[in-house]
Amino acid sequence: MPVQAESVWLGAARKPVRIIMVTSFLGAVAIVLGLILGGLFFGAEFDMKQVLSPTQTPTVLAMLILATIALLSAGIYLSDTRGVIESEPSGFFDIVSLICARLAMMATAGIVLVMFFEVISRYVFSKPTLWANELSLWIAGIVFLLAGLYAMQQRSHIRIFIIYDLFPRWLQKLSDVISVFLIWVFTFLLIWGGYNEAVAKFFRWETFGTAWDPPIPATIKPAILIIVLLVAIQALSNLIADWNKAPEVHLPVDEIDEHEIELIRKNLEG
């Protein structure tokens, strides 16, 4: 996604965040390479099961800590730039949603890398993994949830304007209030009904019951409740940010991405 270079919110902190991101990423990569080389030349044992029990292997734990710092700092750093087709952050919660969106974008690239690794292992070296499919499923579940948060922040979720545009501004505001209220009712009922189960799954660290046995149920169930709550907060943020905006008229032409059309035109001319 093309981005604009101007700082959105970090300002002077942009450079230190970038240093943290690069340093932690290089540190994680160095440890991964060390573990791989140790297994190849020095007989050191390393497999993906150790990733699920990092406390038993300090080196793996250090790698996971550095990788987490790298991902979080990358999410913060990348949220400081705005995509050409992205709306300007205006609500009190927008930055949090943008950071989560950047993490989801990186996670999508991670799924591609995992599946690429699986294809090479399976069809080139005839050594299929036990973890690639489940890891991609695990990541995809989080990406799916965060995509909803990003869609809410960008106001790109399904909205029907045929009747809404006919309303006077006061009635549009009332419709927005009712919509946000219903979102919060849904969120409250979801958390009310799913909280005990989510807590139970998390504290007993419920796993997937496979050879690799990742804790997908223990993490996805709480993630559903947490991210749905974030979506509700973002909906409230949108309501407050849009409260004093002038009435908008939505036309089919608004859905046309001029930037994308220009890129296609340039490619065809080239």
Image (spheres, rainbow, N blue to C red):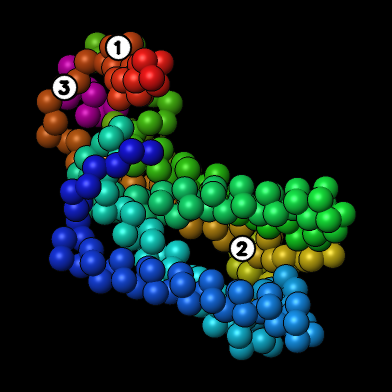
Within 10 Å of disc 3 (Cα), the crowding (few <14, some 14-19, many 20+) is some
- Magenta span covers which residues? 168-175
Identify the residue shown where x is 31% and y is 59%.
77
Is residue 209 located in the magenta-colored stretch of the structure? no
Give residue 214's quadrant in the image. Answer: bottom right
Residue 83's spot in the image, x, y percent?
Answer: 30, 40
- The spot of residue 53 in percent (x, y) is 69, 79
Q: Residue furthest front?
A: 270
Q: Few, some or many C-alpha atoms within 10 Å of disc 2 (few <14, some 14-19, many ≥20)?
A: many
Q: Earlier in the sequence, mark 1 or mark 3?
A: 3
**Count of numbered tags:** 3
Reading the image, the residue beneath label 2 is: 219
Residue at the spot 29% in from the left edge and 68% down from the top edge: 17
Could you tell me how far apart the alpha carbons at marks 1 and 3 are, in whole angstroms?
A: 17 Å
* Membership of 170 in magenta stretch: yes
Left or right of 37? Residue 125 is right
Q: Secondary structure at mark 3?
A: loop
Query: In the shown orientation, is residue 120 left or right of residue 173?
Result: right
In the image, 75 versus 237, the foreground residue is 75
